[in-house]
Amino acid sequence: MRTLGVIMAGGKGERLYPLTKERSKPAVPFGGKYRIVDFVLSNMVNSGVFANYVLVQYMSQSLIEYLRQSWRSNGITRDQFITVVPPQMRMGEMWYRGTADAVRQNLNIINDHSPDALAIFGADHVYRMDIRQMMKFHLDNNADVTIAAQRVPIKMASGFGIVSVDGKSRVNGFEEKPKDPKPIPGDPNFAYVSMGNYIFNYDVLVKIFHEEYADIPGLDFGKTILPAIYKRGRVFAYNFDGQVLPGIKSYEDGSYWRDVGTIESYWQTNMDLLGAKPKLDLNNPKWPIHSASFNSPPARYQDASVSDSMISDGCVVSGSEIRKSILGRNVQVHEKCVIEECVIMDGCEIKPGTRLKRVIMDRFNCIGPREKIGIDTDADAQHHYIDPSGIVVIPRGKTMSS
């Protein structure tokens, strides 16, 4: 089946502020050397989906530059590409008005590719998914539409789109963030939530746009199309929990999927990469998460103590302690510092005697000597942004020349 990837990468990420002050959510750095968008792109490429359009909108320049520098824009054949598509305004002077409208506004380029199916995936989640297994499920069930779904405790499910199914996984209901989610048949403590990832047969999607919703301006998959399409088409829910990812280790969470939409969830997801048995172990040569390549030298430690941490290329740690933290590229930590449960992004410098705890520090910051951040809430409140979770967030600094 000829499959085209359509990646929805236009999210504002308002709840991730101030990390999204100057960039969209998919462009936010993650895990030391990655951006959030690397996960969906890696899933596509690892699954053999080599033709991908990335639809961008809000604060898109950072993401556009990253994709230009880090992901090859074309492959061996003309059917292998990663192309960034901002709003073209071919249908009028308007931005994308919902996820489905974003796809509708780009039907012209989708038609040029002549796909059999579209894999329409979000770009703001951290997870690993073998899309080939979802596609097989789609074909085996002769489905028109397949929704990737995950089991979530029913008490936590009301914040998601809820997929109701029969005993054969055929969808018989879809509600966006209901107060009382319907449980999975035979499993009353859990509900199926939509992951925001869909496979649509091309002819079905074209019919939806041209015949059923042609006159509706704002169009969203979760709010508009999915709550109605199951009544007249073959719509199925693919159980993400059932996938078997190549190379996964026994101690990992096999269905790990996180919406890093808040500061707390972003921080916790970074922490999930750490330890002897991380919930998400990125050291998997059978399912690599691809990212940018840089010419930074190896990390260097000088009389330093580093435990349960990830230290990226180009870092220099001198006479300091790093505990359960993630350091991006070219971070310099001077003497007598203690950094604990922190996420420090590229190009930051931590001067001597500084102590940081539960701090997210955006790129290119320089922290003066003997500062204490994340230790005294009252003092932090006078100078820094404190998330309701108690995590201190330091916005992006000025770009350094070095």
Image (tube, rainbow, N blue to C red):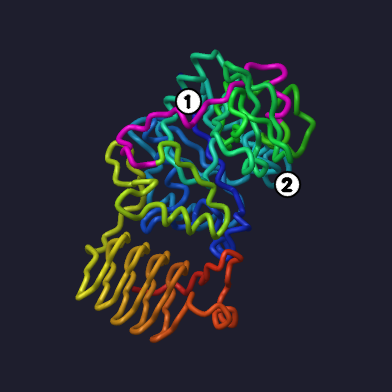
Residue 122 position (above or below residue 62): above
Where is residue 28? Give x, y as percent.
49, 57
Residue 149 position (above or below residue 41): above
Please, which residue is most extreme toward the right here? 215
Residue 227 among those drawn in magenta? yes
The circle on residue 283 is none
Mark 2 closeness class: few <14, some 14–19, many ≥20 residues within 10 Å: few
Q: Residue at x 47, y 74 (%)?
A: 398
Between residue 338 and residue 203, name the one nearer to us. 338
* Residue that numbered label 1 is attached to: 134
Q: Residue at x 39, y 86 (%)?
A: 370
Camera-side mark, 1 or 2: 1
Between residue 68 and residue 371, name the one nearer to us. 371
In space, the residues marked 1 and 2 are separated at their CA atoms by: 36 Å
Between residue 342 and residue 401, name the one nearer to us. 342
Residue 41 position (above or below residue 173): below
Q: Which of the two labelled residues, at mark 1 and mark 2, occupies the earlier sequence position?
A: 2
Q: Which residues are magenta?
A: 225-252
Q: Secondary structure at mark 1?
A: helix
Residue 271 among those drawn in magenta? no
Please, which residue is most extreme toward the left here? 303
Mark 1 closeness class: few <14, some 14–19, many ≥20 residues within 10 Å: many
Residue 137 position (above or below residue 183): above
Please identify the quarter of the rendering in which residue 246 is found.
top left
Q: Residue at x 56, y 61 (%)?
A: 20
Where is residue 76? Give x, y as percent.
33, 33
Between residue 346 and residue 267, name the one nearer to us. 267
What's the residue type where badge 2 is placed? Glu
* Residue that numbered label 2 is attached to: 93
Q: Secondary structure at mark 2?
A: loop
Where is residue 396? Give x, y as percent.
50, 70
